[in-house]
Image (tube, rainbow, N blue to C red):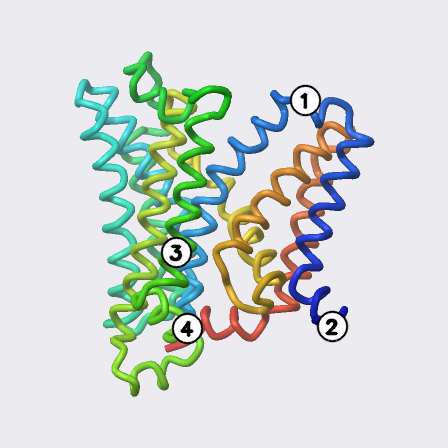
């Protein structure tokens, strides 16, 4: 492999390794076990959402609703638990709403021919309004079943359950996207929809499935967030919108450049959380993180602009 090819495929990953080494040396307490485990826990939420968004983007569609879908799904989970329903039922309801929202997005995009950028902005606004309608703007808070809280707060040995769940999601997503017939169909649909259709692939089903997976990821994350915080607020997923998009775009600069990929999105999530954590430990002002996030998004889009343009405005 030529040096230029190594840089194209692994340059961002190597830069992430360099950032890790720099923070180990210069950021006080960065290397502490508590801090590293905290980073991994924060990565868990972001990585699952980014992987869901990646599946939508693999089919050449955008899902800008996942953050608010996650918030409303969390409200559903919190509402049911707060009112005495069994937590497994509440968790199932949250995930089910995410799947339903993804299916609605897929239907709007494939059958009503609404561009994904517009369709998902619309469903995002609906989910946000419903979250405030149910809560009245006040979070559901309580002392909930320890078994439910164990999902995001528990440990197996020294490893947080949350991190184990994230790794399971990453492995399953990697296998599904690259080693199954359905995953290959999703990628073929995103790379060349017309050619995929002519080869017998149901591109409509592929796009709907991509959106459903994105919604399901939002639903799963909602359960983990509620379990971790022991509360459910109407905007608790909002901060993840730009972060997950940035992680996915950053992932498109490595491994398979200019193509959305699961491993890249995971590594991108790690880099973004590690950077945010390191900036805090280095004493940087709060706004520096936003500036760095903007730079990451702009630089990543410069590599993958054609993919994003097709995803946003394709009919």
Q: Mark 1 points at which residue?
A: 32
**In the image, which disc is placed on residue 75?**
none
Tell whether 266 sits left or right of 193.
Answer: right
Residue 94 appearing in the image:
yes
Helix, strand or loop status at disc 3: helix
Residue nearer the viewer, 283 or 141? 283
Quarter of the picture holding the N terminus:
bottom right
Marks 3 and 4, how far apart in space? 18 Å
Residue nearer the viewer, 2 or 47? 2
Of labels 2 and 1, the one closer to you: 2
Marks 2 and 4, how far apart in space? 28 Å
Q: Which residue is drawn at 30% across and 60% down?
A: 105
**In the image, which disc is placed on residue 190?**
4
Rate crowding at label 3 as few (under 14), some (14 to 19) or many (20 or more) other CA atoms within 10 Å.
few
Outermost residue toward the top in this view: 143
Image coords of residue 204 (percent x, y): 26, 72
Marks 3 and 2, how far apart in space? 28 Å
Helix, strand or loop status at disc 1: loop
Image coords of residue 94 (percent x, y): 26, 37
Residue 63 against residue 137 in the figure, above or below: below
Helix, strand or loop status at disc 2: loop
Rate crowding at label 2 as few (under 14), some (14 to 19) or many (20 or more) other CA atoms within 10 Å.
few
């Amino acid at each position: 492999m030529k040096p230029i090819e190594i840089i194209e495929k692994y340059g961002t990953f190597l830069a992430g390794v360099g950032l890790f080494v720099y923070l180990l040396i210069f950021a006080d307490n960065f290397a502490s076990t508590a801090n590293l485990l905290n980073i991994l826990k924060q990565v868990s939420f972001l990585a699952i959402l980014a992987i869901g968004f990646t599946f939508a983007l693999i089919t050449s569609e955008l899902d800008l609703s996942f953050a608010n879908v996650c918030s409303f799904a969390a409200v559903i989970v919190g509402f049911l638990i707060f009112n005495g329903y069994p937590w497994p039922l509440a968790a199932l309801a949250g995930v089910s709403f995410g799947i339903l929202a993804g299916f609605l997005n897929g239907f709007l995009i494939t059958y009503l021919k609404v561009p994904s950028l517009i369709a998902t902005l619309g469903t995002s606004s609906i989910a946000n309004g419903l979250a405030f309608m149910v809560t009245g703007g006040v979070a559901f808070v309580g002392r909930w079943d320890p078994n439910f809280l164990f999902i995001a707060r528990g440990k197996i040995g020294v490893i947080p359950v949350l991190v184990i769940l994230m790794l399971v999601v990453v492995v399953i997503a990697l296998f599904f996207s690259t080693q199954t017939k359905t995953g290959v169909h999703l990628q073929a649909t995103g790379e060349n929809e017309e050619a995929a259709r002519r080869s017998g692939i149901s591109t409509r089903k592929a796009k709907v499935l991509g959106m459903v997976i994105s919604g399901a990821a939002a639903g799963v994350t909602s359960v983990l967030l509620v379990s971790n915080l022991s509360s459910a607020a109407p905007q608790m997923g909002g901060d993840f919108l730009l972060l997950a998009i940035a992680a996915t775009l950053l992932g498109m600069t490595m491994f398979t450049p200019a193509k959305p990929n699961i491993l890249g999105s995971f590594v991108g999530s790690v880099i973004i959380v590690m950077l945010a954590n390191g900036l805090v430990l280095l004493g940087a002002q709060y706004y520096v993180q936003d500036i760095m996030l903007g730079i990451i998004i702009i630089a990543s889009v410069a590599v993958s602009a054609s993919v994003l343009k097709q995803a946003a405005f394709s009919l």
